[in-house]
C-alpha cells in the first residue's frame, strides 16, 4: 500500500472513524483501525461491541492519490495522535510486507507497527431490508429530541435504547427511563416500510454527529438484529437491543385538566434558579403551583428556599400543585425549538405533558414526585 | 395526656438463650457466648442462668469463667442471628402495639397506653407477651411496667429478680422500691457520676430525689437535672418507633439465611432471593425509609473456599418496593453467580433516605404497589408470617414457609 494524502484530510477522516474504536479492550486488534485502499476508494473501519463504523473517502487524485492498494490495521489512538502532529502538507503513507507503516512528510518520518488486516473482524454480510430515507439533519434532530431520556441504569436494559416505529409514513422515536419520556417524529418521504426496532441510545449518541448538519439522505436498513445507517461517506452497523419495548402509546394523556403556556426561555431561567437549591435535593424536586398566580418553589431542609412567581402567556383549567424533578423539565425544554411551551397536567400524581405551543412534536412526559 | 403505660421487655441472657434455642441439646447446661473459644481470650458476652449459678458473669474473661465452671459450653457469637431474633421479637411486640422502640438488641420499649384494654390488665398483657416470646423463640422475657420509659426500665431491674419476671410501678410507690436503691443503680448514673454523687453525700436514689435540683443543675448542668427527674420518676420522652419522624435511620437493613441443602437451580435460588427481598423491604417500610443501594451475597457449600460473592448496585430511584429492588437483585445475582451450588444467601439495602418524597413511575403504579405492600405488611403483622405469602413460596426450594414454622432454628410442632 502506498498513498499520498493531505494531512488535514487524513486527520479529519481518522477522528471520524476512530470514535468507533473500543476504548478498553483485551484484544489489540480491536483497538485498531482498519485501513483499506483500492484504486477508486479508501475505507476506514472501526468496530466495538455495539457498533461498527465504515468511513469511505473518494480517491479524487488531489487530496488523496493512490500508488498501490493494500490493507492494514493501525493502532487508532497512536495513529491519530501522530498524524495530528504532522505538518499540514501532503503525507506519504507506505506499508511494507511486515505491516510496518511509514508516515513521511519531507525530512520527517514516523514508523508504526501495524497489524494483519486479515485478523480484523469481518463486516457482517447479511440480508438487509431498506426501510427509510431521511436527511442527516432531520434524522439527527429526531434522535436529539429523545436521546437524553434513555435509561442509564441496568434494571430494564431495553430502556437503554431508543425505539423507532414507522407507521403510515411517520417515523416515531421514543425514549424513556420510566420517570420521563420523550417522543419525536418526522414524516417519511419516498418509499417507506412499516416496522420497529430499538437501537442503543449510547451508540446513537456517539455516532449521530457524523450525519448531523447534512442534507444528504441517510438510508436506514434493517438486518437480523442490526440497523444500518448509511450515507455517501459513512456506513454504521448498530447492534440492536432485543426484547419488547414497553407500549407507550397509551401513556400520553389526550386531555389536560390544567394547561399553562410559558415563554420557554423564561421557564428555563426560573428552573435554573430553582436548580441552584433543588440540585441538592434527593429527587431534585421543585414545586409548581398554578392558582391565582403561577409559582415555582423549592426547599432544602438545611440550605434554604427559592420562590418565584412566573409570568405566563396563558393558563386554564383547575388549580394545581405538583412536585417534580427539575432536571427532567430542563432536559425537555432544551430540545424544544419554540418560543412558547405548553404544559398539560392532570393532578399532582399523574404525568404531565410538555410540548411546543400549538404543536405535538416533540412530546415530553414527566412523572411527578409524590411527597408526604 | 393521661397516665401512660410503658413496657420494657428485656430478654434474659439473650445471646446465650438464642444459642440454646437453636441447639436444644444445650438446654440445661451452662453455656456462654464468648469471643473466640479456640483462643481462650475474649470475654463472656452472655451466660445462661446455669452458667451464672457457677459464678460466671457477663464481661468476665473466658479463662476465668472456665476455671469457675469446668463443664462450661463455649459458643462463638453469631451477631447476625441475634439481630434476626431481636427483629422477630419486635414482630411479636408489634402485635401488641404499633409503638415499639428497640432500645438495645435485647431490650425493647412498648407503649401499651392505647392497646392495653384489649388484653385486660397491664399484667395480663405482659404475661401473654412473655408466653408468646417464650413459645416462639424459646427466650424468657422480663417485663418492667411503668408510667414512662425510665420507670419501666427501673421496674424491669426489679422484674429480673422475681421468679415471674414481672414488676409494675404506678409511679406512686417510688419510696417503697426505687428510693432505697443505691444511687449507682439509677438509669443514667455511671461509675464516675455515682462517685461524684456519693462525694456530695447522695448515696441512694431517694437522696438524689430530695436533693435541691438547682444545685444539681449548677454542678452537672442538664445532665444533673435529668438525673434528678429520673430519681423522681419523671420522664416525658415518648416511645419512638424506628421510622417515626425524629427517629434515626439505620445504615442498612439486611437478611440472610443458610439453606437446608446446596442450591444449584437458578429458579430455586431466585425464589429465596425474592423472599429475602420481601423481608428486607418489609423492615425498610417499617422504618419509613427508601433505599438507594441493594447488595446481594452468596456463598457456596464449602465455606472455607472462596466460592461466593457479595456485590452491590445503585437502585434506579430510591424505593421500598419489591418490584424495584428484586429486579436489581436478580440482575446482580445473574451477573455474578458462576453456577456453583450455594448454601448461604444474603440481601441487604443501604443508603437509606427518609421516605417523604418518591419519584413515581410510568410503568409501575408506585402508589398502588405501595398501598398493596402496606396492606400485606399489616396482615403479616396482625396474623403472622404465614397469613399471606407469594405463590412462588409454595414452589420447591422456597424457604418462607419453612422459616415461618421454624423458630429459633428448630421445628415447632
Image (cartoon, helix red, strand yellow):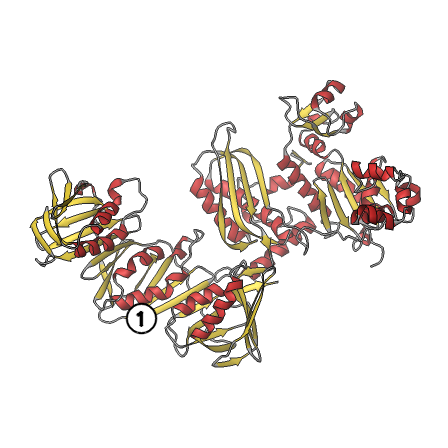
Quadrant containing the C terminus of chain B is: top right
Q: Percent position (x, y) of residue A205?
A: 33, 58
**Would you call the spot at circle 1 few (<14 residues within 10 Å), some (14-19), or many (20 or more)?**
some
Vertical side of A335 occupied by B198: above or below? above
**Residue lying at the far front of the rendered structure:** A107
Quadrant containing the N terminus of chain B is: bottom right
**Residue lying at the far right of the rendered structure:** B176
Between residue B388 and residue B193, name the one nearer to us. Answer: B193
Q: Percent position (x, y) of residue A162?
A: 36, 60
Between residue B201 and residue B395, name the one nearer to us. Answer: B201
Observer able to see residue B38: yes
Q: Percent position (x, y) of residue B301?
A: 51, 30
Between residue B403 and residue A209, name the one nearer to us. Answer: A209
Find numbered disc 1 in the image and state the secondary structure of the residue it sits on: strand
**Residue lying at the far left of the rendered structure:** A67
Q: Determine the residue positioned at 65% across, 49% down.
A: B387
- Asked if residue A20 lies left or right of residue A117, the reply is right
**Chain name for mark 1:** A
Q: Name the residue beneath numbered marker 1.
A: A186
Q: Determine the residue positioned at 38% across, 67% down.
A: A183
Observer able to see residue B406: no
- Asked if residue B325 lies left or right of residue B162, the reply is left
- The number of numbered badges drawn on the structure is 1
Vertical side of B396 occupied by A203: above or below? below
Q: Percent position (x, y) of residue B174?
A: 90, 45
- Asked if residue B363 lies left or right of residue A73, the reply is right
Q: Determine the residue positioned at 79% across, 51% down.
A: B112
Amino acid at each position: 500500500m502506498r498513498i499520498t494524502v493531505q494531512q488535514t484530510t487524513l486527520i479529519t477522516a481518522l477522528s471520524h472513524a476512530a470514535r468507533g474504536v473500543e476504548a478498553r479492550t483485551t484484544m489489540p486488534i480491536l483497538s485498531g483501525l482498519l485501513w483499506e485502499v483500492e484504486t477508486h476508494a479508501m475505507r476506514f473501519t472501526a468496530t466495538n461491541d455495539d457498533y461498527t463504523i465504515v468511513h469511505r473517502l473518494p480517491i479524487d487524485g488531489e487530496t488523496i492519490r493512490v500508488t498501490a492498494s493494500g490493507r492494514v490495521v493501525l493502532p487508532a489512538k497512536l495513529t491519530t495522535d501522530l498524524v495530528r502532529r504532522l505538518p499540514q502538507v501532503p503525507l506519504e503513507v507506505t506499508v511494507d510486507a511486515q505491516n510496518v507503516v511509514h508516515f513521511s512528510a519531507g525530512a520527517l518520518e514516523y514508523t508504526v507497527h501495524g497489524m494483519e488486516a486479515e485478523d480484523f473482524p469481518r463486516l457482517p454480510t447479511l440480508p438487509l431490508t431498506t426501510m427509510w430515507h431521511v436527511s442527516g439533519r432531520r434524522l439527527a434532530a429526531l434522535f436529539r429530541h429523545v436521546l437524553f431520556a434513555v435509561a442509564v441504569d441496568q434494571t430494564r436494559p431495553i430502556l437503554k435504547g431508543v425505539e423507532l416505529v414507522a407507521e403510515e409514513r411517520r417515523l416515531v422515536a421514543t425514549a424513556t427511563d420510566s420517570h420521563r419520556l420523550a417522543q419525536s417524529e418526522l414524516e417519511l418521504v419516498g418509499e417507506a416500510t412499516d416496522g420497529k426496532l430499538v437501537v442503543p441510545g449510547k451508540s446513537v449518541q456517539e455516532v449521530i454527529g457524523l450525519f448531523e448538519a447534512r442534507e444528504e439522505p441517510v438510508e436506514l436498513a434493517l438486518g437480523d438484529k442490526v440497523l444500518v445507517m448509511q450515507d455517501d461517506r459513512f456506513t454504521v452497523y448498530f447492534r440492536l437491543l432485543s426484547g419488547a419495548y414497553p407500549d407507550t402509546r397509551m401513556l400520553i394523556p389526550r386531555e389536560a385538566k390544567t394547561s399553562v403556556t410559558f415563554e420557554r426561555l423564561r421557564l428555563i431561567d426560573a428552573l435554573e434558579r430553582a436548580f441552584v437549591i433543588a440540585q441538592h435535593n434527593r429527587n431534585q424536586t421543585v414545586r409548581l403551583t398554578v392558582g391565582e398566580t403561577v409559582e415555582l418553589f423549592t426547599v432544602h431542609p438545611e440550605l434554604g428556599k427559592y420562590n418565584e412567581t412566573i409570568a405566563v402567556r396563558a393558563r386554564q383549567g383547575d388549580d394545581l400543585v405538583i412536585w417534580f424533578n427539575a432536571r427532567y423539565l430542563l432536559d425537555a425544554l432544551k430540545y424544544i425549538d419554540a418560543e412558547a411551551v405548553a404544559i398539560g397536567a392532570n393532578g399532582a400524581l399523574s404525568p404531565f405533558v410538555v410540548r411546543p405551543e400549538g404543536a405535538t412534536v416533540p412530546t415530553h412526559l414527566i412523572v411527578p414526585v409524590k411527597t408526604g | 395526656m393521661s397516665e401512660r403505660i410503658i413496657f420494657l421487655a428485656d430478654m434474659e441472657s439473650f445471646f446465650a438463650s438464642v444459642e440454646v434455642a437453636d441447639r436444644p441439646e444445650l438446654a440445661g447446661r451452662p453455656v456462654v457466648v464468648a469471643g473466640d473459644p479456640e483462643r481462650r481470650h475474649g470475654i463472656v458476652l452472655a451466660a445462661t442462668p446455669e452458667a451464672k449459678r457457677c459464678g460466671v458473669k457477663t464481661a468476665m474473661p473466658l479463662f476465668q469463667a472456665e476455671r469457675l465452671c469446668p463443664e462450661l459450653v463455649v459458643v462463638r457469637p453469631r451477631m447476625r442471628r441475634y439481630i434476626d431474633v431481636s427483629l422477630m421479637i419486635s414482630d411479636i411486640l408489634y402485635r401488641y402495639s404499633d409503638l415499639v422502640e428497640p432500645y438495645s438488641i435485647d431490650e425493647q420499649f412498648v407503649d401499651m397506653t392505647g392497646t392495653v384494654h384489649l388484653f385486660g390488665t397491664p399484667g395480663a398483657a405482659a404475661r401473654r407477651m412473655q408466653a408468646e416470646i417464650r413459645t416462639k423463640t424459646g427466650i424468657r422475657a422480663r417485663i418492667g411496667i411503668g408510667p414512662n420509659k425510665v420507670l419501666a426500665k427501673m421496674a424491669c431491674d426489679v422484674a429480673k429478680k422475681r421468679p415471674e419476671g414481672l414488676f409494675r410501678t404506678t409511679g406512686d410507690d417510688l419510696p417503697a422500691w426505687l428510693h432505697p436503691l443505691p444511687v449507682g443503680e439509677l438509669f443514667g448514673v455511671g461509675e464516675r457520676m455515682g462517685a461524684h454523687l456519693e462525694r456530695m453525700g447522695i448515696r441512694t436514689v431517694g437522696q438524689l430525689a430530695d436533693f435541691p435540683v438547682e444545685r444539681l443543675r449548677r454542678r452537672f448542668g442538664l445532665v444533673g437535672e435529668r438525673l434528678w427527674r429520673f430519681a423522681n420518676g419523671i420522664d416525658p420522652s415518648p416511645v419512638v418507633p424506628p421510622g417515626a419522624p425524629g427517629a434515626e435511620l439505620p445504615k442498612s437493613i439486611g437478611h440472610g439465611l443458610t439453606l437446608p441443602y446446596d442450591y444449584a437451580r437458578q429458579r430455586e435460588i431466585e425464589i429465596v432471593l425474592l423472599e429475602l427481598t420481601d423481608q428486607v423491604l418489609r423492615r425498610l417500610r417499617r422504618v419509613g425509609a427508601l433505599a438507594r443501594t441493594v447488595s446481594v451475597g452468596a456463598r457456596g457449600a464449602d465455606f472455607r473456599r472462596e466460592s461466593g460473592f457479595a456485590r452491590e448496585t445503585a437502585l434506579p430511584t430510591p424505593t421500598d418496593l419489591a418490584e424495584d429492588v428484586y429486579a436489581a437483585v436478580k440482575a446482580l445475582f445473574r451477573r455474578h453467580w458462576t453456577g456453583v451450588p450455594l448454601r448461604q444467601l444474603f440481601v441487604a439495602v443501604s443508603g437509606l433516605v427518609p421516605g417523604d418524597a418518591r419519584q413515581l413511575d410510568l410503568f409501575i403504579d408506585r402508589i398502588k404497589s405501595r398501598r398493596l405492600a402496606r396492606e400485606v405488611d399489616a396482615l403479616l403483622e396482625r396474623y403472622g408470617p404465614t397469613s399471606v405469602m407469594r405463590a412462588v413460596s409454595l414452589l420447591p426450594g422456597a424457604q418462607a414457609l419453612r422459616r415461618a414454622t421454624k423458630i429459633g432454628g428448630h421445628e415447632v410442632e
